[in-house]
Image (cartoon, grey):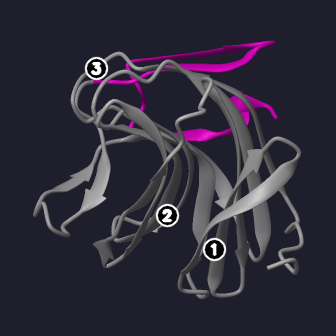
Amino acid sequence: MNWNDLNWLNPPAKASHDAAGLHVTTGDQTDFWHGTYYGFRHHNGHFLHQPASGDFSLETAFRAAFSQQYDQAGLMIRADATHWVKCGIEYVGGTAHLAVVVTNGMSDWSQMPLPEFDGQLHLRLTRVRDAVWVQYLAGEVWQMLRLAYFPPELVVDAGVMCCSPSRAGLQIVFEKMALTPPISTEAY
């Protein structure tokens, strides 16, 4: 992956890359959310992306020391401000959670605690026709976190995202990112 070939939506406070990966420091009170329950619309999170067409898989491995409410990092696909999916770790109530937000007009949010989180996560998002599969690596096995509808006619950008809704200064290292033909989801 050549990080220089990608584009930022909302560049972060600080970003650089070296042999260890992409180092990002978030800006103040950044997030992606659209309406539901809370009423607010935030579209100022950091998203480093490239165009992605048809069916594909997007993978990353990243490290971060999450410590503040709603700190988050992971993957994202985005068509526009009202059609996107973000997934990864979100820090809620003092615990790291695997979380997915799907926005098709309005945002929804699903999460599950990950008490064994050691600071690193391997994550995969696969788009096939009208579906998005979100998986995480548990030991040697890819586990499904969510299967969600996403409009198949929408052209998207795909990449890594990070946000810190309650502060500035979350530091993340994205160790890799790969956009490939879709990895089979037939096991589900």
Structural distance between the alpha carbons of marks 3 and 1: 30 Å
Q: Are marks 1 and 2 in contact (CB under 8 Å)?
A: yes
Residue 139, quarter of picture? top right
Q: In terms of sequence position, does the residue under pointer 3 or pointer 1 come before the other?
A: 1
In the rendered structure, the answer to whether residue 188 lies left or right of residue 37 reads: right
What element does badge 2 sit on?
Answer: strand
10 Å neighbourhood of mark 1: few (<14), some, or many (≥20)? Answer: many
Q: Residue at x 66, y 59 (%)?
A: 51
Q: Position of residue 24 (x, y in %)?
A: 52, 21
Kind of residue at disc 2: Val
Kind of residue at disc 1: Val
Please, is residue 67 above or below residue 135 in the view?
A: above
In the rendered structure, the answer to whether residue 179 lies left or right of residue 159 reads: right
The residue indicated by pointer 2 is: 85
Please, is residue 119 above or below residue 84 in the view?
A: above
The residue indicated by pointer 3 is: 168
Q: Position of residue 10 (x, y in %)?
A: 38, 38
In the rendered structure, the answer to whether residue 111 lies left or right of residue 20 reads: left
Q: Position of residue 114 (x, y in %)?
A: 54, 42
The quadrant of the image that shows the C terminus is bottom right
10 Å neighbourhood of mark 2: few (<14), some, or many (≥20)? Answer: many
The residue indicated by pointer 1 is: 132
Q: Is residue 21 covered in magenta?
A: yes
10 Å neighbourhood of mark 3: few (<14), some, or many (≥20)? Answer: some
What element does badge 3 sit on?
Answer: loop
Q: Which residues are magenta?
A: 1-27
Kind of residue at disc 3: Ala
Structural distance between the alpha carbons of marks 1 and 2: 9 Å
Q: In terms of sequence position, does the residue under pointer 1 or pointer 2 come before the other?
A: 2
Q: In terms of sequence position, does the residue under pointer 3 or pointer 2 come before the other?
A: 2
